Image: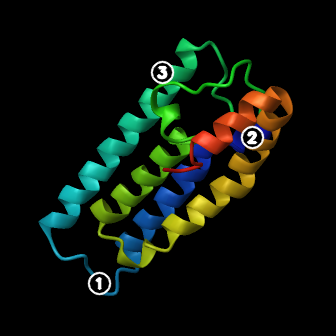
Amino acid sequence: MRWLDVPPVWLAGFVLAAWLQSAHAAFGLSFGGAWAEFLGGILLGGGLLLAILAITEMRRQNTTVIPHQTPSRLVQSGVFSRSRNPIYLGDALILAGLVLWFDAVLSLPLIPIFLWVLEKRFVIPEEDRLRRTFRADWARYGKKVRRWI
């Protein structure tokens, strides 16, 4: 079951919840038109691009992208020079974009809830592993680069 406890599964669950809300419990609420679809598309595309860039950088450095495994290297280049968690940030942008795209007004609170789940289930345990594994390098990196943006 541990293979189910990965961010893409959580993202799929939150996306499904937003879609179901928009399809079955919209209550006549709407973001109000094409601007929401446009912004949703930009957020969705930006989130996908950010996640792809981060995964590519981790692969280039020959380290794992699996959240529950200890990486062999502390990746600090590419998008990791701007955010310690660009894949998770990309996931949040994807969710936000789809909430707008689906016109799921009542699903807006899912975005901060999703970020909270990511932080508690993945970010904090990963950073603890990195702190134990890379000690001084992690301390410098943690001071230099913010967790999200």
Callout 1: few (<14), some (14-19), or many (20+) C-alpha neighbours within 10 Å? few
The image position of residue 80, as x and y in percent, is 52, 33
N-term mark: 2 or 3: 3
Secondary structure under badge 3?
helix
Q: Say what amino acid the circle numbered 2 marks.
A: Glu
Residue at left 63%, top 27%? Answer: 65
Q: For the residues marked 1 and 2, what is the alpha-carbon distance in whole angstroms?
A: 38 Å
14 displayed left or right of 47: right
Quarter of the image with the N terminus in it:
top right
Residue sitting at the far left:
34
Q: Please give the residue where the numbered disc 3 appears in the rendered image.
A: 56
Callout 2: few (<14), some (14-19), or many (20+) C-alpha neighbours within 10 Å? some
Secondary structure under badge 2?
helix
Reply above or below: 31 against 146. below
96 displayed left or right of 1: left
The image position of residue 70, as x and y in percent, is 78, 27
Q: Please give the residue where the numbered disc 1 appears in the rendered image.
A: 29
Choose mark 1 or mark 3, whichever is in front.
3
Reply above or below: 137 against 3. above
The image's mark for residue 126 is 2
Q: For the residues marked 1 and 3, what is the alpha-carbon distance in whole angstroms?
A: 39 Å
Reply above or below: 26 against 60. below
Choose mark 1 or mark 2, whichever is in front.
2
Q: For the residues marked 2 and 3, what is the alpha-carbon distance in whole angstroms?
A: 19 Å
Q: Say what amino acid the circle numbered 3 marks.
A: Thr
N-term mark: 1 or 3: 1
Callout 3: few (<14), some (14-19), or many (20+) C-alpha neighbours within 10 Å? some
